[in-house]
Structure formats: C-alpha cells, structure tokens
Image (spheres, grey):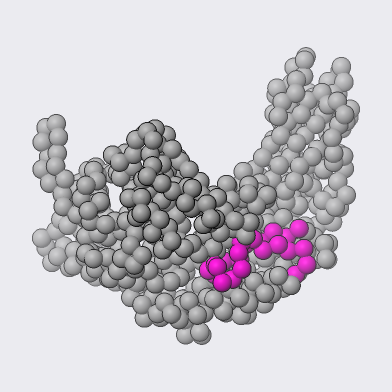
Amino acid sequence: METIRNDFPILGQPLADGTPLVYLDSASSAQKPRVVIDALSECYETYYANAHRGVYQFGVKIDEAVEGARERIARMIGAERPEEVIFTSGTTMSINLVAQAWGRSQLSEGDEVLVNEMEHHANLVPWQQVTRQTGATLRHLPLTEDGRLDLDCLDECIGSQTRLVAVTGMSNVLGTINPIERLTEAARAVGAVVLVDGAQSVPHAAVDVSNPQVDFLAFSGHKLYGPSGVGVLYGRREWLEQMDPFLCGGNMISEVGMTESTWAELPAKFEAGTLPVAQAIALGTAVDYVNDVGFDEIGRIEQALLAEAQQRLSEIPDLLIHGPSVEHKGAIVSFSDQRVHPHDMAELLKRKGVAVRAGHHCTMLLHSRLGVVATTRASFAPYNDSSDIDVLVDGIKYARKTLRRD
Amino acid sequence: MSDELYDELILDHFESPYHRGQLESPSCTHTERNPLCGDRVELQLQVDSERRIQQAYFDGEGCAISQAAASILCEHIEGKTMEEIEGFGASEMLDLLRVRLTATRQRCGLLGFKALKTLVYSDDDTAGTSS
C-alpha cells in the first residue's frame, strides 16, 4: 500500500502550514501518479506536435502515441475495435455527444428515455434537453429507501416505448453500484440502448463493454489518474457509424463542398478540432498504471477502506451516512452531521489537512430526495490508508468541538 | 476553544441568534440562497411610516457563518432608517463579523446583507412583500 502512495508526488508534500495532505476527494478528481506526470512532460519536451497533420518526424510519432493510447483504452474496456473509442473532453461531453448525435436522430414523440434520481446532472440534464427538443418523454426509475435502483419497478418503467436507458455505473454521492447487467437485459428485451456513465465506476473496477454489452460508455481521464481535459466515449460501431457528427470542423470531414460535406471515418468523425494530444497520450499511461496495480488490488484496497470508514463514521452519534450498505457500494461515504453544516465541516476538516467535498455534488434531485441541500463527501482511492480515516474521524470531532457542539 | 474563523462572536450568534424566527406582520421580506451550499436566509423587516426599521428578524438554515452573519445583521440594523441602510456597504458588513473571510465564505457572510439590499432598493411608499 505504501508503494502506491509513493507513486503520487503530491501526497508526499505537506500543505503550506506543514500539515500532511489527507486527500479524500478522489471521486471529484484523482491525484496523478509520477508516470502520468512524466508522460505529459516527455510529450511536451521531446515530441510534441499536433495530431493528424504533421508529416515531419514528431508528427508521425505523436500520431503513433495517440493511437497507441486509444488501443490501450479500448483493450482496458473490452472494446472490439480502437475506433470505437472517441476522445472527448470528459464524461460531460461524451454524454452530450450521445444525447445530441444519437438522440436527435433517434428520438421522437412517444419515445422514452429512462433515467433516475441518483444521476449526476451530466447524465440527466442532456436527456432533459434532448427529450424536450424531440418531443420524447423522460422517465425516472424509482429508487429504494436506501438509495438503490428499485428493480421491482423495472418492468413497469421499461417497455417498447423505451429507446435508451441512461444510468451511472456508480453514484457519485451514495456510492451505489448499479446492476448494469439487469438493466442491459431489460433494455435488450425491448430493443432499447444503454448508456453507462462510467465517471465513477471505471476507475474502481474492471469493465467490459461486451459483458454485459452496453452501447455507450462515458468516462473521464482525470478520475482515472489521468490528466484533466480528456475523456472517452465508447460507442458500439454500429451506432457510431449511423450517427451524425456532434461537433463539426477540422479533422472530422472527408470532403467539404460549398454547401455540404461528408464525414471522416471513425473515430475522426467525432473528434472535431484539435485533440488534447498530450492528455490523450498520458491517459494511455494512466491506463497502463491502473493495469499494473490491477483492478483486483484496487478493489481490495478500496473495499477495505470503505468498510472501515463506514464503520468508524457510523459510530459517531448524530452522523447520518447516506446510501446503501457497503456490499452495494463503492468507496464513497457521504454524510450529514446533524450538528455541523457541510460547509463548516469542510472548512474545519481543511484545518486538519483533510480534503473533502461539501455541496450537492451536481445531484440536486438526489439531495432533495435525501431531504438535505448539501452533504459532506469523503471518497477513497488506493493511495489512501487507515491513517487517513483516523484523521477524518478526529477532524469531525474537532469540527464539533470548534462549533461547541460536542 | 478559540478559532480564527469560528470565534466567540460568530459562535455566540450561531448558537443564540438574535431575532431568529418569524415576524407576525412584516412590512417586507426577502429570501436569498446560496445554491452551491444550500444556505438560506430570509430577512423580515418591520418598517415604520418614517422608514425606520423597528424590528428585523431572520430565518433560514445553513453554515455557521451565514446564520451568525444574519443574526449580527439584524442586531445592527434595528433602529436605522432605510436611507441610512443605503449607505451601509458590504465591507462594513464584513467588518461587523470581525473575522477574515475567504472569497467563498464571503458569499455566506453576505447572504443576509444581500437580502437587506434587495429590500432597501425595492422599498417604496408601499413596501411590498417579496420572497
């Protein structure tokens, strides 16, 4: 465990006041291992050029590096072909791409898109928008009391009118891991496609887009220990070929005429404009890093941290942990302290070097359901250890004392 | 325990707020929210015919800074006229809190103040009720 932590330079640096950093905000963005930082520097220092355009030496090398990253990402998620991996700016853009490029041509009145209240705004608002634009209907699969999808309602919510099911692999607040296989079975039975928001789930567990078969998978590089500014849309080739482009401009065209144009082959058709070249390459390095550590090891460490954090926090009186029990969730613990508001909690935890997030975490619907406007969220990665949980628990007690509430 | 941000004044007002609750028939009320952290402050004023604030109450929920600041604000403005309030600026409000706030926390500290300013500038002879 110590070696994983040592791979991340920022975790070895004390904060400005000398306090060690206790980073519990990986669900928001993960820290970067040395190899990823080096891959970025190496690219900029030794062979940087724009992709797809240079015939000179670097131009060739950069293309090879970008395509090499694409191939490794494709392998990691079980994509049949590298061109099914589209580089985007992140999960938000990936989902918007599908909502517009797929939704605009496929949805019409009478059709339904199925979402639910635990979705991040990035997997909710794009569907609100495209159903409004096309006259289709947005439907919500209910949640259970403990914050899981209510599968008892699945049959009544999914039918021949359902065209797409958009669901998160793992809730960014509750940590709930959703039963993608059940959803893909139900969707396939009625001919609906499935989009999985993998922003949270992809960094935590091995994923294979062919089992269970999903049509679209969106995720971000920066939560997978890669750079910010790059993400991925996996789309099944049949769909990507049928879909019109989302953004239009350079790189995505085949022939440009006076009044109309034709589109480039995949993946270029969906990669208009200048790619985040160095970030895409370094995301390939992040994938190598994650594979080296291994998803089994990542899962083992995170589940142990989750179980310990959930147990220790549940021992604190008047502190409510949201979401299901640990066997149904990943390494996220969001809580409400009846004595300390999340904003004060995050501020006071900061004094102890603890980085947590306070707010609605882009899930206003979920927070209304929980009956709170904000929660405090601690999230874990394999570079965390038990001592981080000690500091968190002490920090919560300190916050209560400071507000004279213990 | 003394703290640079959550000092005695802030904590006193947070724990035992001045005029927290509902006025029976306020001349005007306005609610401000900070959607990011969910803080809410509803300010209610009882203003007399000479446009003097007879009573100021607040209600709401949120972090210690937003709620204590609203309490401090109510205590400060009672007895002042709306004209006097026009000259009451954000920096003066922040000074009343006596602690240094970061830009993010200033939004908490100024929530009640924003509600007050809305009321002052929408105040006319027929001071209405808005929320």
Q: Is residue B131 left or right of residue A158?
A: right
**Residue A323 shown in magenta:** yes
Q: Measuring from the top left, give residue A126's x and y in whole percent.
A: 42, 43
**Quarter-wise, where is residue A255 in the image?**
top left
**Quarter-wise, where is residue A78 in the image?**
bottom left
Q: Is residue A315 left or right of residue A199?
A: right
Q: Measuring from the top left, give residue A302's x and y in whole percent.
A: 52, 75
Rendered-image quadrant of the C terminus of chain B:
top right
Image vertical order of residue B31 relative to residue A199, above or below: above
* Residue drawn at (83%, 62%) of the image: A404
* Residue drawn at (76%, 29%) of the image: B29
Q: Is residue B70 left or right of residue A353?
A: right
* Residue A354 visible in the displayed image: yes
Image vertical order of residue A49 relative to residue B41, above or below: below
Image vertical order of residue B15 relative to residue A34, above or below: above
Q: Measuring from the top left, give residue A285's x and y in whole percent.
A: 32, 72
Which residues lie in the magenta part? A316-338
Of A96 and A354, the residue lying toward us = A96
Image vertical order of residue A53 relative to residue B124, above or below: below
